[in-house]
Image (cartoon, rainbow, N blue to C red):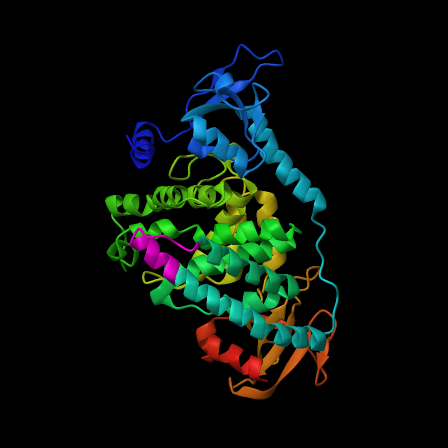
Amino acid sequence: MNFLSKLFTRKKQKKAPPTAVKATVKPRSEVVKQRISSHELEIGMTIVELDRPWTDLPVMFQEVTIKNNKDIQLIQQYCQYVFIDQESFKLQKEQQIAILRRQTRYKLKQQSAKKVSADLKRELPKAKKAFDNSNQHIQQVMQQVQQNGHIDIDKSKELVASCVNSILGNPSAMFWLTKIKNQDEYTAEHCLRVGILAITFGRHLQLPPEELQLLGLCGMLHDVGKMKVPSSILNKPGSLSSDEFDMVKEHAVLGYVFLKEHGGIEEQVCAAAYNHHESLIGDGYPRQLDASYLSLYDRIIAIVDSYDAMTSDRCYRKGIPPEKTTAILYKETKHRYDEYLVKEFIKMVGVYPVGSFVQLNNGFYAIVIAANSDSKLTPIIEIIADQNKALLKQKIAVNLAKDKKYKGQVLRIARSVPDTEINIEMSQFIKQHIAA
């Protein structure tokens, strides 16, 4: 039976993790053992038993904690399945989030609107080059996956690194570019946007650059399995039947299998493709895993994937406004999404995300160019059009948290505005900013 057959056989028998049994040979306190395939190993898991004698492996102790991908590859070389210490793995996941919670003290330095605008314009050309190259590459990746070909993973990593460098320089530029959307290329562009949003969120969480690169790769490859699902189902304008929805849900398995069998791809990236539709209480798909099995990468990708999917137009519905989307994410904390991470994500995007359009109380229209982390309702904006939606020749940058008045009037945001209301094509608008 091949790897793919085993996955589907296990899934049909029972989607929940295998039943735990108690170990009796450990001298320390009782250990709850969990049997898993060696292909499901992740960093942080502690192996307490093998499918063969420990003396068959070149290891010093009869217990191994997975510290890196080399450890995973070594175990997979010798074993088809292993037993992990379920409780230690769960504790490791909890500690990972707890450490992150203590470390994250992110605040944007208060800057003048003029400087924020100038920094954004300076970064935009670099960001757009990285975005365009990545967009072209991800289209090729999707074609290769569809044809069951070989993807250039080194190129993927190179382009992710260029996105990380841009986001570390100025996250707003890349965030702007995620507003460029083509409904006909949804899956590929969605993967690119999730990668960018994941990197931006990781920066907010103060993750180191090497983790940002891994997180970006998780985002860019998380949905490759959808290329194995018939496009007639993915792009169906009406409601899916039960059988059709089951086929769509298989994309998580199919993506994991493709990435795993491809080789040269980090386990965290493969796992994110497998786990981004799981939930904290174990009622997600495809395996109904609970929180103890979901890594930081899995949890971040689940949030940014849902955010981008909900805010994007699809063939069967219009996108949901960002403020409603974040409300939905928050409502589902402790059930599907990690509460701490959702709260931090909402802090990052704010009530009015970067790149969104708003109308001011004087009737003028503006675009958000940066958030004020300590003042969600008063971002930094550029006024771009008058009350009649006529574009201004010269854009006016205003920090609503500091610059209280414009032409004698106290400014505030009256409402969010759909992109279509003021008839601005985002890619053209960005080109004008770069040329300005």
Q: Residue at x 35, y 49 (%)?
A: 225
Q: Is residue 342 magenta?
A: no
Residue 266, given in percent of the width and then of the height, sits at 49, 44
164, above or below 180, in the image: above
Q: Residue at x 72, y 58 (%)?
A: 107
Residue 79, given in percent of the width and then of the height, sits at 43, 26
Q: Which quadrant of the figure has residue 252? A: top left
Q: Which quadrant of the figure has residue 142? A: bottom left
Q: Residue at x 48, y 29 (%)?
A: 75
Residue 347, given in percent of the width and then of the height, sits at 63, 55
73, above or below 393, in the image: above
171, above or below 41, in the image: below
Residue 41, given in percent of the width and then of the height, sits at 48, 33
Give 114 or 372, whichever is nearer the viewer.
114
Q: Which quadrant of the figure has residue 1? A: top left
61, above or below 246, in the image: above
Q: Quadrant of the C terminus?
A: bottom right
Q: Residue at x 42, y 66 (%)?
A: 136
Q: Is residue 229 visible?
A: yes
Query: Total marks drawn?
Result: 0
Q: Which residues are magenta?
A: 140-152
Q: Residue furthest bottom?
A: 393
Q: Is residue 416 visible?
A: no
Would residue 64 appear left or right of 244 to someone viewing this image? Answer: right
